[in-house]
Amino acid sequence: MRIAAHPEDETQRIASLKSIGLLDTPSDLYFDQLTAQAAHIFNTPICAVSIIDSKRQWFKSIYGLDVCETGRDEAFCSHVVHDHKLLEVRNALEHPDFHDNPLVIGAPNIRFYCGTPIHDTNGFCLGSFCVIDTKPRQFTEEQKELLNSFALQAEALIALHVRQKDNEEKNREIISSRDLLRRELARQSSLVSNAAAAVIRISHRGIIEDANKKAESLFGYSIDELVGQNISMLMPKDIAKHHDGYLKHYDRDKRQNATHNSSVIGEGREVSAISKSGELIPIHLAVSEVVIDDQSQNEFIGIVTDLRETKRKERELERQSMLLDKLHKGLTDYEALISGNSIWSFLQESLRELTNSEYALIGEVDPSKSEPELIVHSLTDLSWDKESKSLMQKFLAGSSRVTNTKSLLGRVFAQGEVVLTESPATAPGRRGLPDGHPPLHNLLGMPIKQGDKTLGMIAIANSESELNDELVNWLEPFVATCSLLIQLYRQMNERERFTAELEAAKDLIEDASRAKSEFLSSMSHELRTPLNSIIGFSELLQANRKTPLNEKQSKQVHQINSSGKHLLTLINDILDLAKIEAGKLSISLEPTLVDSVANETLEVLQPLADKSGISILVKANAQHIEAMADYTRLKQVLINLLSNAIKYNRQQGSVELSWEVVDQSVLVHVQDTGIGISDDQIDHIFEPFNRSNAENSGIEGTGVGLALTRKVVEYMNGTIDVKSDHTGSTFTVTLPLANCQVKSDSFTSGKVQNDQLNTDLTSQSEKVVLYVEDNPANQRLMQDIFEDFESINLVVAHEPFLGLEMAKTHRPDLIILDINMPGMDGFQLLKRLKQEPSLEGTPCIALSANAMPNDVKRGLNEGFDHYLTKPIDIPKFYDLIDDYFEEVN
């Protein structure tokens, strides 16, 4: 496993990460909705916003896993941070940097990873926005662009988090300084000329007696203009008219028991003041009574704090929250909005509401046009007569497009410009508005982009907000969301079209497959029944001793029998081919000794070779080679190839069978001295029913054998090739090499007797071990192993149903099961064995080529006492058998 190095800016990056205050923050709904949405869009089980700390990977949000952090060394995202670019791992098990990563070989079993960098507001890479799958896959460039769009959304959420944090800190500072100042002034009961807050001293009658410099700047009056005036001059009219009454009836001794809250004396409250210019100013006012000894009339000190900046920040925070809510709704509810055809009106209304605008527009550039044309998806109604109403309806229906690329809107959607003007009617290039058109006081148009490509545009007009670069920057997250939604909208439309086509194609395929299966089933039954009679009666006629046939009749009956068997072979090959195409051919891939398969094949074909006068030569470059194959199916392949080599050979010709190991593959060659295959036919010999012009040769054949052979080889993860010229043909079968080679020489002769059901097999003193295995080579190996255990008798069953019956009959002391067997696998057989009362407590061992950790774990969970993997570790196996039968040896 390669561990990602730290980036060059690691120290600054970590410092910036700490300053943001994002680490170890609580779960955030907006981040969680974003990762859930991305997982759904990309159809992946896991999606995360990953932050790389100094020694760990921490998830701000993770969908599909119940973890909050992992080590940094094993994090895929560490490579994204170091390389500062998108990382795609299509199959982690085959990737040199990740194949042994703990997150790949263990939970969550990562196979596919695609992550793109996430940056903070300072430009440092914090981590990545990533999607993870447990299956290998590959992203298109469009999917990578879409993933980048999600990363931009995560960056916008992080930026919003930073802004909120800064605003909260500033508000706390303002409140803290305000309270400190109020307490200090109340204690000193005096004016501080250079105080940060406005301080005003008034008499018991409400007359201003003094003020500081801050009061001058806050209210716009000079101190001379304030002194001697009633304090009500700084109050809005609805409050000023009641102020003198408040002071007149103020009773200090009763203030503590007052039930109304209209007084500000002794309290701090947010109220409004009015300046000399008439501006209404939000302030915080704290009034303290100053008790003067030996006087019956006291004075009051008012401390006034300007809240305009605080209120502005509150409005900005509220505005940011409103923007985030709109983005969140658009992302989380987009499927419902799209299905209800209301996504565009939602975006247009949201844009108008966010910017306090009278009019708003959302449009998409038609991707099918060579020249830019704008499809108007949603537009605020600004029609002024019947004709303009009709034109607007055409735009919204899609029958009319905006095509003028030199207009203000055209500069946005065709040239990708940001257009900002306070005078749309008289802007350069404009000819004014049509008569009756509602007046436009300002206009802002922004392109919706994906990289350098313009997808569409937004526009607002008659906005109450000031149109400037600050507003443009503030709307960037909204525009980025529009870009993402347009891409999703296009993808959903494309997916719906593709799904419809796929469903139609699937229905056609299913209908064809069903018809083919029904036809094959019918043909199998209808043809096999009469063929059974034809072949059977022809053999009876040939064997009839009471009324033997004359020579002519014998030849005729022999021809009938030969033709019937040829037709039966053709039917069997066609049915096998159909099973392969339907994915229903039974295959059990195990380490298979090529020598053994070759010997059995030659025993079958030697009589045919002798009859044809063909000599068969065997040449093995290495002995005892094991290929990962199905024993029976490999034998079928060799029989097909060797029988063809014999049938299509020259008189007194020869066939050479050889095998060798090249890299991690076993190559089996069948070479003949026949007439060869022409160049124009060699590309078609593996097609069903194509006999390469051999139909008129007089040699029997079905035309299916080679097609079936190739399908069987491919089913065993192999390939078959052919080379041919006028001197003959060579067919080469390539199969995967098994993990190790068997050293025994016992595979070259003899036939294993593995189906004994006789009850005399064991004596009372012997222990019985039942081995259920469909591969003859593995059966023979196990028999050789148990020859060393004199008091243990090994019983072998070649298929699971026979094994079940033998277990009931012999009641073995130990059962060893293969896992991959036709008809019933080892897990199913184990379940059946455990249901037998007579076998209760009988230990069972699994012996399988399925050697992954999950396979072993499953085997033990299913109830096997031990789970051994192939190739078998013989010394370890001996020790295990000794543990089970200590009293035997």
Image (cartoon, rainbow, N blue to C red):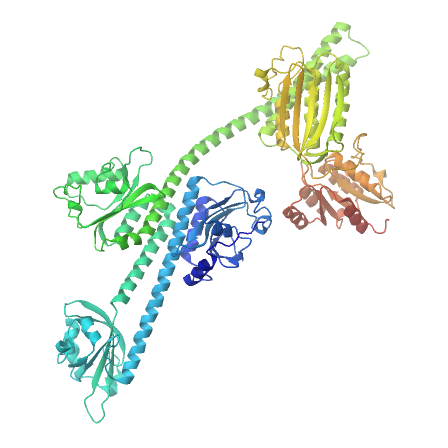
Q: Position of residue 83 (x, y in %)?
A: 48, 49
Q: Residue at x 53, y 59 (%)?
A: 55
Name the one closer to the observer, 69 or 427: 427
Residue at x-position 69% and y-position 27%: 668
Using the image, determine if residue 664 lies above or below residue 21.
above
Give whichever of 679, 634 is nearer the camera: 679
x and y percent of residue 249 in the render? 18, 84
Occupied quadrant, residue 806: top right
> Which residue is pictured at 36% across the width and 43% down the height?
451
On the image, which quarter does residue 452 sit in? Answer: top left
The reply, left or right, for residue 761 in relation to residue 455 is right
In-image side of 396 versus 548 (left or right): left
**51 in relation to 846, above or below:** below
Report the number of numbered marks.
0
Above or below residue 606? Residue 813 is below
Q: Position of residue 60 (x, y in %)?
A: 46, 57
Residue 391 left/right relative to 853: left
* Residue 116, placed above or below residue 577: below
155 relative to 185 in the view: left or right: right
Can see residue 702? no
Asked whether 149 or 861 is in front, the reply is 149
Question: Is any part of residue 856 visible from this angle?
Answer: yes
The x, y position of residue 203, in whole percent, is 17, 84
Extreme-front residue of the structure:
8
